[in-house]
Amino acid sequence: MSSPTKRRIYEILPGAIVWITLIGSVVLSFTYPLIVIGFIIVFDVFWLIRIGYYAPFLLISWWRYRRALKHDWQQDAQRLPGYDKIMHLIMLPTCGEDIEIIRGTLNTILASTTPCDRMIICLGGEARFYEQFSDIARRVTEEYGSRFCRFVTTIHPNTQFGIDEIPGKGSNLNWMGRHIAPMIEEMGISPDHLIVSSFDVDTIMHPQYFSCVTHAYLTSPSPTRSSYQPVALYNNNLWEAKAPVRVAMFGTTFWLMSELARPEQMMTFSSHSMSWRMLLDVGFWQKDIVSEDSRIFLQAFAHYHGDYRVTPIYLPISMDSVDSVSYANSLLALYKQMRRWAWGVENFVFMMEKFLPDRKMSFRVKALYIWKQIEGSYTWATAPLLITILGRLPFWLASDTYRSFAMFQNTPFTLQRLMQFSLVGAFISAALAVTLLPPRPAHVSRPYAALTIVLQWVLLPVTGILFGSIPAIDAQTRHMLGGRFRLGFNVTQKNRRAS
């Protein structure tokens, strides 16, 4: 079988499994409803086990997160051998953001416990925003240039776009990395002593984030063979965000926190840190993908034949939630963001092409990562629909022939009890969400704020379908069809008020 044929099979497979499930559930509910009922029971039991597995790890991560907030990471880091050699490169790709967003991030970096003379800032713009970015670059260089070890700006040209490059964060980061590499070499910084942090430009770091990463790097047995993943919060404008947006963003945070407590098959997500040595070895970020945050991990994982991992950092970084002036536009922006995240299904093709032929990578490692990718994509697209709608179809559509069966009569009570048990995960998430809230801004009234934070979790079944299943099905269907249906990089619409 030729490589292009294999690639098309890999592209089709995740979406095909989803559509077989969806269409099969409807058709069989008419013709063989007992098969659908049996499948739904098995799936609901699997989902209950998954929640029972998820909840303890979420609580463990939350406890470690609270403990890490109280720790003096800078004091511990500067006592370690090699601390004086460590430098930080902070890469901030932009795409038309306002100067106040950029200033907010730079001010946060200045407030870090890690000395700023150990930091190199690279601010990357896009040529399609040339005039706006040139003005911003000039102004922030004047304001902040002398306050760091180096302050560099780059502009990613549009002329690079083609078959092997698309407009997006990955291609911009690739350009930034290649542009700054000669300067790093000229400065005499060892690739093993440079920690790179790739951040969305709206990222607000905990003051001790870089100190904590330095500590983790210096205490790791193989620091260059690891990425460093913090807790991703979306708190910058959380109080102004719409209720469905808050539920979706908290859901993302809790998923990541549960992963941090069991990082054996974890991949990086959103803003995180890594070594310069790894970036040089893999040739920087790929230029033709959307999900650059997880793909850079997989590039390293494949390059080192599975000898690469994620090290949890239990300190928060905070980014903007999607928001717009109107409610409808906010929900549309949320849908597009969730669809972009679901486009991580493109990693399945990369894993199949890189992992399967690799004889140095163990079969167990290959199987675990590939299974987690395909299972995650499948449940993301199907679980909310199977639990809330498709699981009820046999009882609505089946003929009278089947309604006398004991299985048919008893299953609704069984499913109801299973779903009652599964609500434990939602209650835990709702309780923990309150502890992660940022301080309430003065312009947000206390009664209104308290009421929405409590009531927003009622929307979980609806948000699970509208901003879980549907965008995931959309992304996987586009990936399956390929060609002009493929998804490009979507810049998230945000609307942060000045504070």
Image: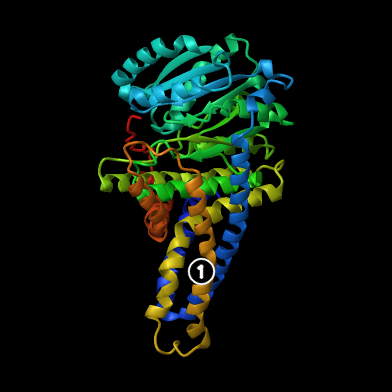
Q: Amino acid at mark 1?
A: Gln
- 207, above or below 189, in the image: below
- 273, above or below 354, in the image: above
Is 35 left or right of 357, judged from the image as shown? left
Position of residue 29 measured from the top left corner of the image (x, y, whole percent): 42, 77
Quarter of image, res 101: top left
Foreground pick, 426 / 134: 426
Would you name the residue on which mark 1 appears?
Answer: 420
Is 194 left or right of 25, judged from the image as shown? right
At x 57%, y 25%, the residue is 196
- 32, above or below 331, in the image: below
At x 45%, y 71%, the residue is 391
At x 65%, y 38%, the residue is 309
Position of residue 114 measured from the top left corner of the image (x, y, whole percent): 58, 20
Dividing the image into 4 quarters, which one contains the C terminus? top left
- 417, above or below 333, in the image: below
Q: Please say which color scheme the image uses.
A: rainbow
At x 53%, y 36%, the residue is 316
Q: Give the crowd class for mark 1: few <14, some 14-19, many >=20 residues within 10 Å.
A: few
